Amino acid sequence: GAGVSQSPRYKVAKRGQDVALRCDPISGHVSLFWYQQALGQGPEFLTYFQNEAQLDKSGLPSDRFFAERPEGSVSTLKIQRTQQEDSAVYLCASSDDRGRQPQHFGDGTRLSIL
Amino acid sequence: SQQGEEDPQALSIQEGENATMNCSYKTSINNLQWYRQNSGRGLVHLILIRSNEREKHSGRLRVTLDTSKKSSSLLITASRAADTASYFCATDARTSGTYKYIFGTGTRLKVLA
């Protein structure tokens, strides 16, 4: 079956623009995670959904970051008024249990802010 | 603010040799997972070890867990050039009933043919 799909794969935006990153998890997966990965670092947790409920958003770096999963499947991570420090790879992962099972990752969106 | 620390940060070995990577973490965990990441790709799950387990095997992989020292190791035996990748440990930081995985800084493994 299909894995986790993220789009776009690459996104270049000018500082101050808004961006939206999409994640299509594996069908039926309850849990969905967003991570931010800086170059040469491990993924850093941003937020966690269980179905459509956002249960943990403690990792979102500022109120410019917003994530949603309105129907419990596809999720969108939105960054408003982008800044250069937002440049990173944004990874999405899903799992078929409430976080107790291995996560399946997409290939990420590489965001570059000019 | 990452919880896990891996060492070494980078490791270069010859094909056929064994590679050992270590991970240390800070708080109590329910389980620890190891992931591999090839350049420009997402992470791929390798193995999960629960807090009440001490050792686990999967093919050429062997993982140990020492909860008293808050550390884990990943051993890859008979390495191949295709094992070249970054390896991360991840621990669950269960807080308030939600699930948050904390990843380490990673070990960049290079296997020379």
Image: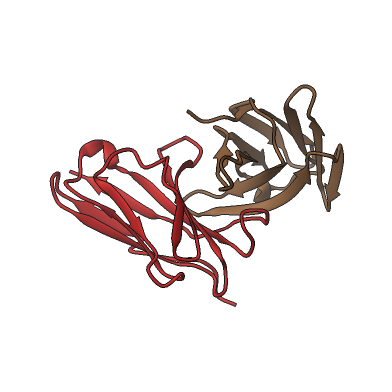
Chain colours: A red, B brown
- Expressed as whole percent of the image width and height from the top left, the position of residue A27 reads 54, 75
Q: Position of residue B70 (x, y in %)?
A: 73, 26
**On screen, B86 above or below A92?**
above
The quadrant holding residue B113 is top right
Q: Residue at x 70, y 51 (%)?
A: B46
- Looking at this view, is A21 or B86 the one in front? A21
Reply above or below: A105 against A43: below
The image quarter in which residue A6 lies: bottom left
Q: Position of residue A74 (x, y in %)?
A: 41, 69
> Where does residue B24 sit, x and y in percent of width and height?
67, 26
Q: Please count the marks in the image.
A: 0
Q: In the displayed structure, does residue B75 sit left or right of residue A50?
A: right
Left or right: where does residue A34 sit relative to residue B79? Answer: left
Q: Quadrant of residue B102?
A: top right
Q: Residue at x 62, y 47 (%)?
A: B36
Outermost residue to the bottom: A1
Say if residue A34 shows up in the picture.
no
Residue nearer the viewer, B98 or A65: B98
Q: Is residue B70 left or right of residue B64?
A: left
User: Residue placed at 62% from the left, 45% from the top?
Assistant: B84
